[in-house]
Image (cartoon, rainbow, N blue to C red):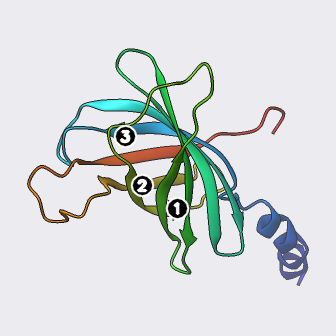
Amino acid sequence: MKAFLLLLLSLPTVLFCQTSLDGLWEGTMTVGGIYSNEALPMQLYITTEGGEVTGRSYVTLPDGEILRMDLSGYLYGDRSIQLVEVSFAGDPANDIMPEFNRQYQIVYRPDIWNSELRGYWQEVTDLTFSDGRRMGRMTLSKQKRDGA
């Protein structure tokens, strides 16, 4: 009985410890195809409101410049996420225009210790089945806030 009572009292703590999709995610994205191992550092900053997801992507290019794009999309009930780069987020220190926009298909894997986003990106184009369409993989981990 005591064990059951202890379990019942600790349940709210476990539920509130679950990680949120909102916040900073860091990792890499591959370039050169989905089977490529050439990776670029990447960050996503994501906020959610219901099923709507907005955010910004930061991709560090080989020359050290950072490409910033605003994102918009949806979080579905199966924890899959669809995001599209909707606008260039340039400023006086960032005038790198992208060659193309990307769309992302991501799976959110929440975990108390190591939450993860895994998925694929592809070039937004009318030539959906073109051999020249650029695409790759991505893997990101949730970054912890200081003091947590």
Q: State the separation of the CA atoms marked 3 and 1.
A: 17 Å
Q: Position of residue 35 (x, y in %)?
A: 17, 46
For marks 2 and 3 on the same chain, the one whose residue lies earlier in the sequence:
3
Query: Quick one: 122 or 148, which is closer to the camera?
Result: 122
Tell us which disc is closer to us: 2 or 1. 2
Query: Quick one: 94 or 47, which is closer to the camera?
Result: 94
Residue where numbered disc 1 is placed: 109
Tell us which disc is closer to us: 3 or 1. 3
Q: Is residue 2 left or right of residue 113?
A: right
Say which element carries label 3: strand
Q: Is residue 109 left or right of residue 41?
A: right
Residues packed near mark 1 inside 10 Å, few (<14), some (14 to 19) or many (20 plus): some
Is disc 2 in contact with disc 3, using a CB cutoff of under 8 Å? no
Which residue is rendered at x = 20% and y = 65% of the image?
Answer: 128
Q: Amino acid at mark 2?
A: Arg
Quarter assignment of residue 89: top right
Question: In this view, which residue lies farthest toward the bottom?
Answer: 1
Q: State the separation of the CA atoms marked 2 and 1.
A: 8 Å
Residues packed near mark 3 inside 10 Å, few (<14), some (14 to 19) or many (20 plus): many
Q: State the separation of the CA atoms marked 2 and 3.
A: 10 Å
Q: Which mark is residue 146?
A: none
Say which element carries label 2: strand
Residue where numbered disc 3 is placed: 29
Residue where numbered disc 2 is placed: 118
